[in-house]
Amino acid sequence: MTTQEIIAEVIGLFGIAATIISYQCKVRKHILLWQLFSTTCWMAHFAVLGALSGAALNLVGALRCIVFAGRGEDTKAGKIADWIGWIPVFLVMSAAATALTWGGWTSLLPFIGMILTTFATRASSAAMVRLISLPNDPLWLAYNAISGSMTGVITEVCIIISIIVGMIRHDIPEWKNRLKKN
């Protein structure tokens, strides 16, 4: 392993930790703040590996987390974040990032994942963030494997487990309580 690859993998370890922590948060805003840290780590990780589509799309992801973190709050930032137009803005940004860093068909994997995650981060509840995020991970898992990102592969497996654990801990009990009330 080269020094560059070791540096990328160390940065990826911070990304793994932040991602796992994010899906264990009960509050939606906390999920997005941890994901902001995570996407920043992954942006640096992919840049060091030379996987430019992954780096560029994680930059878009970081911007998306910043915007959507305030969603639902009764503040000026909350009102800005609630604007439905952000979805097409982030989808166009993701498409542009993919086009500018095109590395072949593999660039489509994180692009499609970013589309799913755009809808997930705009979701109004932590439960919906977890639910919509889940299908994203097989796409990034494949991209990570092809790009040579071992920490990325490990992360996607950990994310899938973390989302499921988060659903079991937070979402399923909440859904059961709602069913009992009805």
Image (cartoon, rainbow, N blue to C red):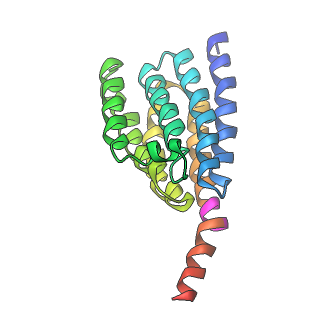
The residue that appears at 55% across and 80% down in the rendered structure is 178
Q: Quadrant of the N terminus?
A: top right
Q: Residue 168: say if magenta.
A: yes
Of residues 88 and 13, which is closer to you in this image? 88
Residue projecting furthest to the top:
3
Q: Residue 122: say if magenta.
A: no
Q: Position of residue 50 (x, y in %)?
A: 49, 15
Q: Is 20 placed above or below 6 here?
A: below
Q: Position of residue 17 (x, y in %)?
A: 70, 39
Q: How many marks?
A: 0
User: To which quarter of the image does residue 7 belong?
Assistant: top right
| Horizontal relation, residue 131 to residue 94: left or right | right
Of residues 42 and 152, which is closer to you in this image? 42
User: To which quarter of the image does residue 127 belong?
Assistant: bottom right
Q: Position of residue 33 (x, y in %)?
A: 62, 41
Res 6 visible: yes
Q: Is 161 placed above or below 181 here?
A: above
Of residues 18 and 90, which is closer to you in this image? 90
The residue that appears at 49% across and 57% down in the rendered structure is 124
Give the magenta part as a residue range.
Answer: 165-169
Name the magenta segment's main secondary structure.
helix
Q: Is 27 placed above or below 56 here?
A: below
Of residues 168 and 152, which is closer to you in this image? 168
Q: Position of residue 62 (x, y in %)?
A: 52, 32
Res 144 visible: no
